[in-house]
């Protein structure tokens, strides 16, 4: 009799490991970055684009992307937007508070350890920059003379909702092309106004030799993918990160199902060719 291969599930996938908040940074009115260190043992390893289930003890558990780089030996970073009970409890954590971490889960942006001669275009809407932050850090750190250029194109509803302003400046300083835009300007804003799609045509990337990593509201990703295709970008070179309700994170409960995909296992990072038909099914 042939027995099914045994899948050994690391205990950190089933049981939250306790981490302490060692730093709390306010990014915007409703977005906070938590820097976490394990109470005992080693910090977990992950790849850019993966997520953890973070628990606010006594309140609940939610999926939050890791926003640090896998090569960063410091605390684990998660950037959380306060939208409901659990994210509110997480955003209200103080330095010294304890939170549970289960993971990492899901697919990644596919860049770790892979030099690339093509340009990489990162497109983010609002807090969609959080799941991409680690990848950008990796790409910027790994840039060599013979590697492709890195483009970071960011859109937000208002200037006050732009996250990681220090990082944007540091990436530009390190050689990335960084552009940001807002839908609605505010007093004192002298930057670009308009949707993120307006940044694409003049950014200067090689549309025929690039890969695109994208995260944001699905309507923004759809319009951006369409505009990229008009510029000549192959949809098979476009990768998106999708969000759905996550519970187990292990492909067991079905809560995160999107068509044939279980997004905790087959996502969150999915090729646009596969994602596009499914994204059209529903709008968040
Ligand atoms: C793979 C993945 C990665 C994520 N990464 C991040 C991240 O880095 N930072 C971050 O702030 N959030 C992230 N999210 C979204 C986060 O999980 C939800 O905001 C959270 O579950 C809301 O829980 P809550 O109890 O605070 O609010 P709830 O009371 O559950 O929800 C409040 C509102 O948020 C909406 N909502 C709930 N879950 C989601 C979801 N998964 N996607 C979109 N809207 C949702 C609800 O419809 C409702 O309108 C991610 C989600 C997934 C699936
Ligand atoms: S969250 Fe349970 S199957 Fe994906």
Image (cartoon, helix red, strand yellow):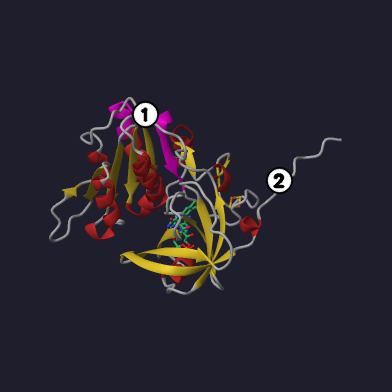
Q: Is residue 65 above or below residue 138?
A: below
| Residue name at image x 33 percent, y 49 percent | 125
Observer-nearest of 51 and 244: 51
- The relative height of residue 237 versus residue 105 in the rendered view (above or below) is above
Q: Nearer the viewer, mark 1 or mark 2?
A: 1
Residue drawn at 27 percent across, 54 percent down: 157
Residue 215 shows in this picture: no
Would you name the residue on which mark 2 appears?
7
Classify mark 2: residues with Cα within 10 Å, few (<14), some (14-19) or many (20+). Answer: few
Q: Is residue 161 left or right of residue 115?
A: left
Quarter of the view holding residue 68: bottom left
Which region of the structure is painted magenta? 227-242
Residue at the farthest right position: 1
Residue at x 55%, y 71% (from the top left corner):
57
Q: Is residue 112 left or right of residue 208?
A: right
Report if residue 6 is visible in the image: yes
Q: Nearer the viewer, residue 284 or 9?
A: 9
Q: Which residue is mark 1?
A: 117
Please state the horizontal and vertical placement of residue 146, each as a whole percent of the image. 33, 29
Q: In x, y percent, where is residue 280?
A: 44, 40
Q: Position of residue 133 (x, y in %)?
A: 38, 50
Residue 231, magenta (yes or no): yes
Specify the quadrant of the image occupied by residue 230: top left
The residue that appears at 47% across and 64% down in the rendered structure is: 36
Badge 1 marks a residue whose secondary structure is loop
Identify the disc placed on residue 96: none
Q: Is residue 172 magenta?
A: no
- The spot of residue 40 in percent (x, y) is 58, 66
């Amino acid at each position: 009799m042939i027995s099914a291969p045994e899948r050994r599930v690391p205990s950190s996938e089933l049981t939250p490991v306790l981490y302490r908040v060692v730093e709390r940074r306010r990014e915007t009115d409703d977005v906070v970055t938590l820097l976490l260190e394990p109470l005992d043992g080693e910090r977990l390893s992950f790849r850019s684009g993966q997520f953890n289930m973070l628990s606010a003890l006594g309140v609940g558990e939610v999926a939050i992307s890791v926003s640090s780089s896998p090569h960063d030996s410091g605390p684990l970073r998660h950037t959380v937007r306060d939208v409901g009970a659990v994210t509110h409890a997480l955003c209200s954590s103080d330095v010294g508070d304890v939170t549970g971490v289960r993971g990492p889960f899901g697919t990644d942006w596919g860049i770790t350890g892979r030099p690339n001669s093509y340009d990489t275009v990162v497109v983010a809407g609002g807090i969609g920059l959080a799941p991409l932050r680690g990848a950008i850090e990796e790409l910027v750190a790994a840039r060599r003379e013979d590697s492709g250029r890195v483009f970071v194109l960011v859109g937000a509803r208002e200037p006050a909702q732009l996250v990681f302003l220090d990082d944007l400046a540091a990436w530009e300083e390190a050689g990335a092309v960084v552009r940001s835009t807002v839908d609605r300007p505010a007093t004192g804003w002298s930057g670009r106004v308009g949707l993120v799609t307006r940044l694409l045509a003049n950014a200067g990337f090689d549309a025929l030799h690039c890969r695109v990593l994208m995260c944001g509201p699905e309507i923004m990703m759809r319009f951006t993918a369409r505009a990229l295709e008009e510029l000549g970008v192959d949809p098979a070179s476009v990768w998106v990160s999708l969000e759905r309700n996550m519970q187990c994170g292990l492909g067991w409960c079905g809560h995160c199902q999107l068509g044939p995909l279980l997004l905790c296992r087959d996502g969150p990072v999915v090729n646009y060719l596969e994602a596009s038909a499914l994204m059209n099914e529903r709008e968040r």
